[in-house]
Amino acid sequence: MKSIVAKALFNSHSYAEYRKLVTDLLSEGKSTGDEQSESLTHYTSLNEARMNRLEKTIKISEETITKLQNLDNHYIWLVISEGWCGDAAQILPILHKMANESNKKVDLRIVLRDENDELMRHYLTNGGRAIPKVIVICKEAGIVRADWGPRPKGATELMANYKKEFGVIDEKIKTDLQLWYLADKGISVQEELMQIMENIKYDRF
């Protein structure tokens, strides 16, 4: 497992590099990933607009900033993502701002799911390749300490309840999910991820 993570880190992107990669592909009418289609390119274009907006509007709470800066160790947040993923577009700008507020306690790195299948197979959600997945790696020890994703609990429950009632994941629930993220303002991502980080803080290696 350690070699799989090391390989992924070697091929990972910074947040700025990831944004540029997605933008450059869009200019060619493409998306990231093995599959190419008009719908995936359309979703990628929507995500570009979402991420541009979130980078300007998302606020990291003072409580989260304090907790990040008081972390005992240095960490890498290795995120499995793709440009067409709506959840990733909502979550990555939050992670980026959290990492920037951490006084270099957290280094955010991003890899593409379809280029890292071996890594993805270790972080399936109910047997599926759902993204984004945040893999928390202790820099000093060089080992994975935790993982999180692909969605906050509230968003996961929203999707599960809709599928249970209607039996499908359609455009309506996708719109409802984006509205959930808009109302949540990034709070759930911050709280859930910091709970994980605090649990690591008091856990012996």
Image: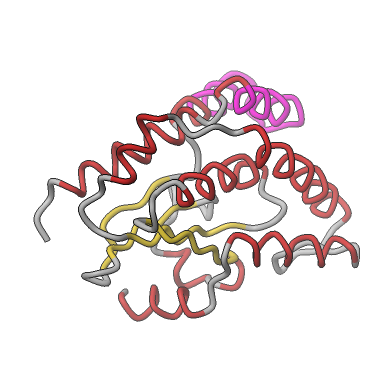
Q: Which residue: 54% across, 32% down?
A: 59
Q: Position of residue 20 (x, y in %)?
A: 73, 64
Q: Which residue: 44% across, 80% down?
A: 7
Q: Magenta stretch containing residue 28, yes or no?
A: no
Q: Which residue extends farthest front?
A: 103
Quarter of the rendering containing residue 21:
bottom right
Residue in front for this viewpoint, 57 or 184: 57
Quarter of the rendering containing residue 49:
top right
Q: Position of residue 173 (x, y in %)?
A: 68, 26
Q: Position of residue 76 (x, y in %)?
A: 38, 62
Which secondary structure class fits the magenta region best?
helix
In the drawing, does residue 146 fall left or right of residue 185?
Answer: left
Q: Which residue: 74% across, 45% down?
A: 47
Q: Dividing the image into 4 quarters, which one contains the N terminus?
A: bottom left
Q: Report the magenta residues as a range.
A: 157-182
In the drawing, does residue 157 fall left or right of residue 35?
Answer: left
In the drawing, does residue 153 fall left or right of residue 28?
Answer: left
Q: Is residue 128 above or below residue 175?
A: below
Q: Position of residue 43 (x, y in %)?
A: 79, 46
Q: Which residue: 85% across, 48% down?
A: 42
For the rendered model, the colour scheme is secondary structure
